[in-house]
Amino acid sequence: MNKNITILSRHNDLEDAIAEAGGLNREYNARLFDKEVEAVKKQAAIQEFYVVESHGRKIVLWQYECDIKLWNEFSPYSATLSDSTTIGWYNATYNCFSNVQTIGNNRSNRKKIAEAQNNGSDLFVLNF
């Protein structure tokens, strides 16, 4: 099943995006939270952060680049491992990710994603 994910807002500052998404509970462990905010700022391929609504909740996304381009959810205090990968095409005209779908998380699919991106595709892995 394919769907679109609409980008609600864009921010040049991670803290502004966090506030727009409703804020996150920094009190759980303020030191770790602040450390993760700074780490994400350093790891972000571009200093532009997005707020989207997914499954009824607002989340903050940031772009990371390695052998493929990914949109990661800012999610302090947790990490996720999965045997599947969600992909979507960024559509600047409609300000959304379109044709969002889940595929297997394996070396063959990562190679196909990297090839598509290297050839100018707006295909992204959505890590949220």
Image (tube, rainbow, N blue to C red):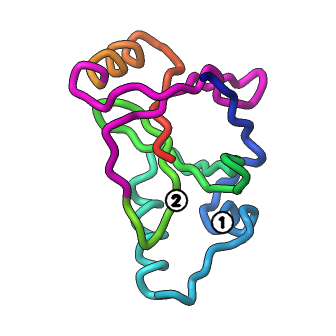
Furthest residue to the front?
1
Residue 10 in percent (x, y) is at 71, 48
Residue type pointed to by label 2: Phe
Residue at position x 63%, y 74% from top?
24
Distance from Cα at disc 2 to Cα at disc 1: 9 Å
Q: Nearer the viewer, residue 77 or 33?
A: 77
In the shown orientation, is residue 25 left or right of residue 96?
left
Residue at position x 72%, y 41% from top?
7
Residue at position x 72%, y 62% from top?
21
Residue 119 in percent (x, y) is at 40, 10
Crowd tier of the residue under label 1, counting other residues whose Cα lies within 10 Å: few below 14, some 14–19, many 20 or above? many
Q: Which mark is residue 27?
A: none
Residue 107 forms part of the magenta stretch: yes
Crowd tier of the residue under label 2, counting other residues whose Cα lies within 10 Å: few below 14, some 14–19, many 20 or above? many
Residue 4 in percent (x, y) is at 69, 29
Secondary structure, mark 2, is loop
| 88 lies above or below 120 | below
Residue at position x 50%, y 22% from top?
123
In the shown orientation, is residue 8 left or right of residue 104?
right
Quadrant containing the N terminus in the rendered view: top right
The residue indicated by pointer 2 is 74
The residue indicated by pointer 1 is 18
Q: Are marks 2 and 1 in contact (CB under 8 Å)?
A: yes
Residue 112 in percent (x, y) is at 32, 15
| 89 lies above or below 86 | above
Which image quadrant for residue 85? top left
Residue type pointed to by label 1: Ile
Furthest residue to the left?
107
Secondary structure, mark 1, is helix
Provide the residue span drawn in magenta: 80-109
Residue 99 forms part of the magenta stretch: yes
| 82 lies above or below 109 | below
